[in-house]
Image: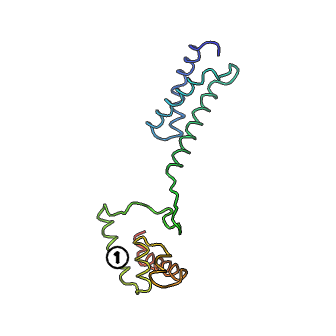
């Protein structure tokens, strides 16, 4: 583009359109304003790369869309938890205990009561599992095959789900 002031005037003229598009992408007013600001900065930084015969509005909106996609991918990557444990048992487990509310405390008492009614062959491995032991550690401590430990924990979990199905 030959004239830098014309470039900046066209960019300023697009600000309300950019804000509307950013709001459609983010559905959050503050995030939309941040996205418009990031886009404006990027467009100004790349003014020399704009070719005069290219659709200016399309070029600017493409930059905004790319910034949004890159930020989204960055957020997803940073939120991904990689489980390096042997049995992958931490994968997708919530790290929140739920005990901050009275309902969470009540549910914990109900769960403990239900587990205490299990026979020892299910209660012991299941209790060890929810305490953080790995399947292999439970099998070693109980002197049982690994498959037996896994199946007992599985059946204890299913039984617990059936007993507490009202809490779902």
Residue 167 image position (x, y, % from top left): 40, 70
Instruction: Look at the picture and state if 48 lies above or below 133.
Output: above
- The quadrant the N terminus occupies is top right
Residue at (53%, 44%) from the top-left corner? 74
Residue at (54%, 44%) from the top-left corner? 72
The crowd level at tag 1 (other Cα within 10 Å; few <14, some 14-19, many 20+) is: few
Instruction: Look at the picture and state if 161 lies above or below 14.
Output: below
Q: Coloured how?
A: rainbow
Residue 107 image position (x, y, % from top left): 34, 70
Residue 152 image position (x, y, % from top left): 49, 82
Q: How many marks?
A: 1
Residue at (63%, 20%) from the top-left corner? 48
- Read off the residue under disc 1: 112
Residue at (47%, 33%) from the top-left corner? 34
Q: Is 86 on the left or on the right of 129, as rendered?
A: right
Q: Is 146 on the left or on the right of 30, as rendered?
A: right
Instruction: Look at the picture and state if 48 lies above or below 167.
Output: above
Please, what secondary structure does the residue beneath circle 1 have? helix
- The quadrant the C terminus occupies is bottom left
Frontmost residue, 120 versus 11: 120
Residue 100 image position (x, y, % from top left): 31, 60
Q: Quadrant of residue 50?
A: top right
């Amino acid at each position: 583009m030959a004239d830098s002031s014309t470039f900046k005037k066209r960019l300023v003229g697009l600000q309300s359109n950019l804000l509307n598009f950013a709001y459609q992408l983010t559905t959050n007013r503050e995030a939309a304003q941040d996205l418009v600001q990031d886009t404006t900065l990027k467009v100004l930084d790349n003014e020399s790369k704009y070719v005069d015969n290219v659709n200016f509005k399309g070029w600017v909106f493409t930059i905004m869309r790319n910034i949004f996609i890159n930020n989204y991918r960055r957020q997803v990557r940073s939120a991904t938890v990689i489980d390096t444990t042997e049995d992958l048992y931490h994968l997708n487990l919530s790290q929140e205990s739920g005990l901050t509310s009275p309902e969470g405390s009540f549910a914990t008492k109900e769960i403990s009561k239900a587990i205490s009614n299990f026979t020892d062959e299910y209660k012991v491995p299941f209790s060890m599992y929810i305490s953080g032991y790995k399947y292999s550690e439970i099998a070693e401590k109980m002197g049982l095959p690994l498959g037996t430990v896994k199946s007992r924990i599985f059946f204890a979990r299913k039984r617990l789900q059936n007993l507490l199905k009202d809490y779902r």
